[in-house]
Image: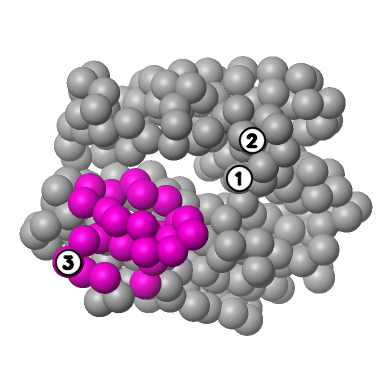
Amino acid sequence: MKKHIQENLDAWNTRAKKHIHSAFYDQPSFMAGKSSLKEIETALLPSLDGLKVLHLQCHFGQDSLSLARLGAHVTAVDFSQDAINIAKGLSKEMNLPIEFICADVLDPMLKLEQDFDLVFMSYGVLVWHEDLAPLAELVSRSLSDDGRFLLVEFHPFMQMYDDATEHLTHSYFQDGPISGVEEGTYADRNDQEEITYTVWNHSLGEIMNSFIGAGLQVEFFQEYDFSPYPCFNHMIEVGSSRFMVEGKEGKVPMVFALRAGK
């Protein structure tokens, strides 16, 4: 395994064990019935009752379980064994049967069904891939002929900022890996543990053309000036579960959504 992939895996194993107990993920409210799905994706999801859904890069499974609560038959994949172990425990505790698979979504040995009604990915998923083409091909071949792909993701413009969300320090266009050390995690900025990571930025053009090149037809695309998560530094709440960077309210794109079919 490449060094940066191992570091990223170690980082997500660490995050999973911390995130399950964090106020950010609010696990008690989730267990009491609150959905983890946010307004952007909720507005774009079809009726899920009886649909087969593939959730890629599912972390410890809150969104997977929220999709199952809406009646979907869910298969969910993540490369963190610690995250998958937590997800399986929650699935059993909540009596929501989900097939949780621990695997790199780009592992050629990963065998998935190829007739999902929906492939779903959300928030902080694309930056972990150097090349989006194999991911797009996986999405395309996993969909049924009339299936849909829904991606809700942080805008690549936000990846240009430094950790303080103050200065533009990285290129909008991919020009190599961005490596760094995060103190704590986005779910707990006060945590002092250092976590090493490597990510890649992808422009909107690169993202859209990757999925178009895999045979998908984009039917909806929208940018949003807010994030449903306070996961960047210096964020303020401007509405119910809507956050913007202080001093940049309404001026920068923070999230985008893309829906596509074959």
**Stretch of the chain drawn in magenta:** 225-249
- Left/right placement of residue 153 relative to residue 55 reads left
Disc on res. 36: 1
Please state which of residues 106 and 70 is positioned toward the viewer in this rendering.
Answer: 70
Q: Of the residues tagged 3 and 1, which is closer to the observer?
A: 3
- Which residue position holds label 3? 247
Question: How far across and how far down the image is residue 71, in percent?
Answer: 85, 48
Please, what secondary structure does the residue beneath circle 3 have? loop
| Sequence-first tag of 3 and 1 | 1
- Which residue position holds label 2? 30
Please state which of residues 205 and 48 is positioned toward the viewer in this rendering.
Answer: 48
Amino acid found under the numbered disc labelled 2: Phe
C-alpha span from label 3 to label 1:
28 Å
| Sequence-first tag of 2 and 1 | 2
Identify the residue at image location x=44%, y=27%: 22
Location of residue 244 (image quadrant): bottom left
Amino acid found under the numbered disc labelled 3: Gly
Question: How far across and how far down the image is residue 189, in percent?
Answer: 26, 33
C-alpha span from label 2 to label 1:
7 Å
- Left/right placement of residue 50 relative to residue 174 reads right
Amino acid found under the numbered disc labelled 1: Ser
* Residue 2 visible to an observer of this rendering: no
Mark 3 and mark 1 in contact? Answer it, CB < 8 Å.
Answer: no
C-alpha span from label 3 to label 2:
32 Å
Mark 2 and mark 1 in contact? Answer it, CB < 8 Å.
Answer: yes
Please, what secondary structure does the residue beneath circle 2 have? helix
Q: Is 240 within the magenta?
A: yes
Q: Is 70 within the magenta?
A: no
- Left/right placement of residue 45 relative to residue 38 reads right
Location of residue 93 (image quadrant): top right
